[in-house]
Amino acid sequence: MLPALVVFDCDGVLVDSETIANRIMAECITAAGLPITYEDCRSRFVGGTLQRVIDTVEQWLGRPLPPDWKADFETRRDAAFRAELQPVPGVAAAIETIRASGVPICVASSGNLEKMDLTLGLTGLKEHFEGRIFSATMVARGKPHPDLFLFAAEQMGQMPETCVVVEDSLLGTAAGIAAGMRVLAYAAETDSDALTAAGGQTFTDMRALPGLLGIGATARMGAAD
Ligand SMILES: [Mg+2]
């Protein structure tokens, strides 16, 4: 049976932003007096909100970050996105196949709407999600809590158990499972065993996504016009 709704995470699933964002984040946290590597940023922060990063770093530092730290990080990160950002390999074709099957799609991200507007716009994916873009800023609790995925399902008029989440982070996979949804976990850049342990069904090639959703070549041809 086809899912009633496919809920896409944004960073690392639609847009290939994690390498860029965590490189800039490591530079900005190090500049604030806490030396940290790119690898540490990735393993500790991927999938959560920027506020979660700030809260954690301030706890480690034992003092607040400078007042302009967040704005400076976002400015540098967004400049790097404009210069370098690409869609995740194969995701545009996968989305087109899913849409042609008639299964609705939406986005649910820890990032804010301004960030998604930029990254989905730069990668040419925004047209697929107009009016169906949901952010952790719209709910009380971010991932790994289920709030955002439940909100997205409600806004799209679907029951959680009929929805499939596509995630790449441990926090996001845990959030999808907590929401009672099936989670397809894209493991190209995240530890596959850890995603499996969190309850995700792992895959490493976006070309496989329509098939994992039960959407085949026949369904695509039948629905295409
Ligand atoms: Mg992600």
Image: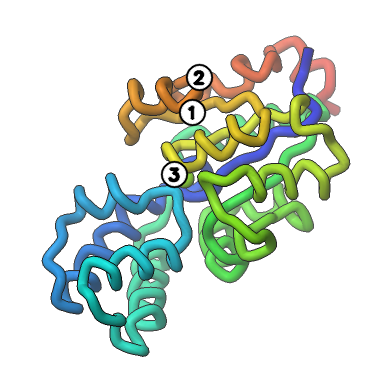
Cα distance in 3D space between marks 1 and 3? 11 Å
Relative vertical location of residue 225 with respect to residue 85 in this rendering, above or below = above
Residue for badge 2:
201
Image quadrant in which the N terminus is located: top right
Q: Which element is circle 3 on?
A: loop
Label disc, if present, on residue 12 of the rendered structure? 3
Q: Are marks 2 and 1 in contact (CB under 8 Å)?
A: yes
Asked if disc 3 is less than 8 Å from ligand 1, the answer is yes
Residue for badge 1:
185
Q: Earlier in the sequence, mark 2 or mark 1?
A: 1
Side of 97 relative to 167 (left or right): right
The number of numbered discs placed on residues in the rendered structure image is 3
Side of 141 relative to 25 (left or right): right
Side of 156 relative to 38 (left or right): right
Q: Residue at x 35, y 24 (%)?
A: 192
Cα distance in 3D space between marks 2 and 1? 6 Å
Amino acid type of the residue that numbered disc 1 sits on in the rendered structure:
Ala
